[in-house]
Amino acid sequence: MSRRRFYFPLLCLCALPVAARHPVRERNAMVVAQEPHATDIGVAVLKSGGNAVDAAVAVAFALAVTHPAAGNLGGGGFLLVRTAKGETAFFDFRERAPGKATRDMYLDAAGKLTRDSLVGWRAAGVPGTVHGLETAHKRFGGKPWAGLVEPAIQLARGFPVSYALAESLKNSAKLLSRFPESNRIFLRNGHPYEKDETLAQPELARTLERIAQHGAREFYEGETARKLAQAMQAGGGLITLEDLKDYRTVVRKPLTGSYHGYDVISAPPPSSGGVGLLQMMGMLEDSGYQKHGAGSAAAIHYVAEVMRRSYADRSEHLADPDFFKVPLSGLLSKQYLARQRAGIQPDRASTSDEVRPGKPSPEESTETTHFSIVDQQGNAAALTYTINGGYGNGVTVPGLGFLLNNEMDDFAAKPGEPNLFSLVQGEANAIQPNKRPLSSMTPTILLKDGKLFLVLGAPGGSRIITGVLQVILNVTDFGMNAQEAIDAARFHHQWLPDKLSLERGFSPDTIALLKARGHAVDTISGVALVEAIMAEKGWLAGGTDRRGHGKAEGF
Ligand code: GLY
């Protein structure tokens, strides 16, 4: 059955059933993750009395085994928590540039960008995942740490390869085969895994055993740290024992705002996610764009113009707040966003040449994976973490069994030149020692009348923010259920390159109307994979992205 949404005139809707999938609905608790073993482990933790943060720790370790393209020990990310009592915290365990990193480390003698920020040892930032999970567990966890790592250890000893994993490994053979340890573990030295064969990762199992027994200190100061630093040196990478020892998770205040009566809680810098989301919502609020209807050319045009303006600001005004003064209140001020909105023409696309990064009011006072969890008490966790590109920099650390990130590419390796996600970024996000690269990860929670309403987030590089935005708009402005909202065809504009990218599923008529407004339209297959939980009428509704292979499960 086709899962594509069709938009009929209102009269037709009265006569025909709407082609919408239903979310998974349960009364008590829900886990939505991109890989089924991980979802099952999260549910088991919740059933045994663990809370949402306990489950998040167990799911994150499980994904590091079963979803090696993005789940990780060698990367970093963000965890947004909201407790049933209303307390919120944002755990920033983003990678940091090594202490020896320099601004121009990825330029050759002629000043041209090399590929070193993407592939190989030098692409890795100092991993934050294990530190972040332990920090969150210490603050909110209830179950013993070792028991939360244990299911991942079991999986690392061997689990059946899914169709999705077999395909993903084959598709990444070019990268993985460049590095002997990755070639051996993930490609069996040229004999790729088929569905249902067992993938055993004994080195990873042993690393996880040490983490289970000794906690994050083992990763940052113990045997794991020593082996990682030695391998780095041998491979020509920059991360030292000192870098690992110095790594800290930062617990930040989440960014908050409101949209059409909902409270929005999202990711602060060093992610651009929450700022982007709130900027776009701020321009959409009071615009009346939604009266044109979901999927209409007029609504897509308007939202795309809003995206264009927000991504232009991203290019100049956002970076690690510990290194760069982000003009946060200016970027989010109602007056500034109203000024930005005033430049949008309803019937004509701007060009990105004419839309430059704005001048916000002066500051008054400042491949990835996602899962969402709600527990029996109503505590919520939204965790997005990553090694950046699929399988990161391609390097599996000998003897440790985990892949390293290529997060250094999220910096502006050469300000003004596009990165992996074609994002053009400025001086604010240039490389500096110990700095965190700007991210687009957008773990987000919405409240309605002060109560938990929506928990969501996504992988997808620069398309994360626009994906999360559209799912929220589909729910709040167009009345869709969690699954419909995720399934609906999406679009994306990021200022540069100046094009409106549409997923398949929009009608030729709609596309023609967008072109007539002046948009340079192209078709994309990859959009953010949103995993969401919506609380409605006493139910938790779990929606997992039809474009991926995830699983929503609860009880
Ligand atoms: N590595 C993708 C992001 O953090 O936005």
Image (cartoon, grey):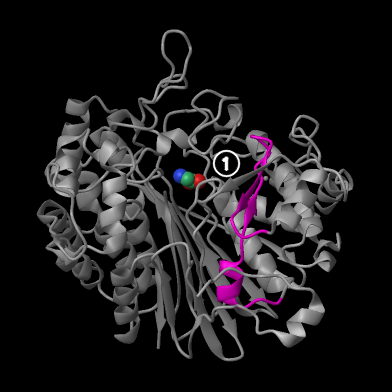
Q: Which residue is mark 1?
A: 321
Query: Which residue is depicted at the point 26% across and 45% down?
Result: 403
Residue 276 vertical position relative to residue 205 in the rendered view, above or below: above
Circle 1 crowding by C-alpha within 10 Å: few under 14, some 14–19, many from 20: some
Coordinates of residue 79 in the picture (x, y in percent): 46, 60
The answer, for residue 131, to whether it is visible in the render is: yes
Coordinates of residue 487 in the picture (x, y in percent): 56, 68
Answer with left or right where residue 313 lies relative to residue 333. left
Coordinates of residue 461 in the picture (x, y in percent): 50, 47
What kind of element bears circle 1? loop
The answer, for residue 73, to whether it is visible in the render is: no
Where are the magenta residues, as a range? Answer: 479-506
Residue 388 vertical position relative to residue 44 in the rendered view, above or below: above
Q: Is residue 495 magenta?
A: yes
Amino acid at circle 1: Pro
Q: Is residue 28 magenta?
A: no
Q: Quadrant of residue 87?
A: bottom right
Residue 425 vertical position relative to residue 245 in the rendered view, above or below: above
Closest to the observer, 200 or 161: 161
Query: Which residue is depicted at the point 54% across and 39% down?
Result: 322
Answer with left or right where residue 85 lies relative to residue 311. left
Q: Quadrant of residue 147?
A: bottom left
Query: Which residue is depicted at the point 33% across and 44% down?
Result: 127
Residue 516 vertical position relative to residue 414 in the rendered view, above or below: below
Closest to the observer, 247 or 386: 386
